[in-house]
Image (cartoon, rainbow, N blue to C red):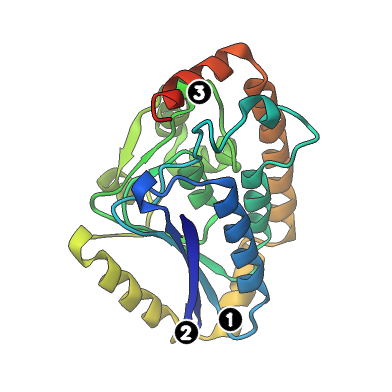
Amino acid sequence: MSVRTYIRGSTYWIRYENAKKANALTEKMYDQINSALDEANEHKQTTFTVLTGDGNYYSSGNDFSPAEWDTKKAASKDVEIGFSRWVRRLIDHEKILLGFVNGPAMGMSATTLALMDYIVCSDKAFFYLPFPILGVGPEAGASVTLPAALGVSRANGLMLFGERLDSTDALKCGFVGKVFPHDEFENRSVEMVEGFEKLPRHSLLASKSLIRGPVWREKMRGITETELETLRKLFGSEETQKRIEERFMKNK
């Protein structure tokens, strides 16, 4: 249960390796992801940072099992939640962020994709936000980024009603840039990033600094902080605590 990192060419790879639990994200994994993003951002020879998953899932989102999660504690303003630290790092990341979605992406792992610069996915991937099931709400800027990327009705279908977005529709609406056959995903993704690495580094990073520069970052920090305040209130509600407990206690 960990996060593996390695450098290949001018790309820093971050791979979720909790395949037995569909790459569910634990506090330990958040610590590892955050450390990896810091290292990738400071690495002077890399241009790209890739986030991807091991096995059949990109990630099933937060691990809400009792051993990993305390909903009442998460409601406290004095507790720093791991995923909020992750979101800040994605917003501030200076390298080109690539999301290589090898399988289903759920919850936090799906919403954070909209903070990345380019996304590709397997044809077996889908995107699912269990907000209404758990009694929670948008995070990682999704209240703004998803309507902008998907259109209002499709985004609200995901966030309000728990609808799924499959890989074909994600490509049609422009949420992802390419869809690769699942059995070719690893090789095709590597080939694609190797092609990107031939482009001029100084130009790529300068362009990103304009596309997602100080104005965008300040805006997204404000949006994500407002979402976090709402999430804390929801985590403090008995209804949300009951829903999370009922859904995840059975997996204890």
Indicate which label's residue lies in the foreground, 3 or 1: 3
Q: Position of residue 113 (x, y in %)?
A: 49, 51
Q: Position of residue 63 (x, y in %)?
A: 49, 39
Please name the amino acid that badge 1 sits on. Answer: Ser
Q: Are marks 3 and 1 in contact (CB under 8 Å)?
A: no
Q: Nearer the viewer, residue 100 or 249?
A: 249
Position of residue 140 in the picture relative to residue 81 (left or right): left
Q: Residue at x 68, y 50 (%)?
A: 85
Q: Residue at x 41, y 42 (%)?
A: 60
Give the vertical position of 23 relative to 244 (above or below): below
The numbered disc on residue 203 is 1
Please name the amino acid that badge 2 sits on. Answer: Leu
**Nearer the N terminus, badge 3 or badge 1?**
1
**Residue 50 makes an appearance in the image:** no
Give the vertical position of 82 relative to 46 (above or below): above
Q: Position of residue 89 (x, y in %)?
A: 66, 57
Q: Secondary structure at mark 1?
A: helix
**Nearer the N terminus, badge 3 or badge 2?**
2
Residue 196 is drawn in which quadrant? bottom left
Q: Are marks 3 and 2 in contact (CB under 8 Å)?
A: no
Q: Position of residue 210 (x, y in %)?
A: 65, 66
Return the residue at label 2: 199
Return the residue at label 3: 244
Q: Residues within 10 Å of mark 2 (few under 14, many from 20)?
A: few
Q: CA distance from mark 2 to mark 1?
A: 8 Å
Q: Residue at x 33, y 46 (%)?
A: 104
Q: CA distance from mark 3 to mark 2?
A: 46 Å
Q: Residue at x 63, y 55 (%)?
A: 31
Q: Are marks 2 and 1 in contact (CB under 8 Å)?
A: yes
Please name the amino acid that badge 3 sits on. Answer: Ile
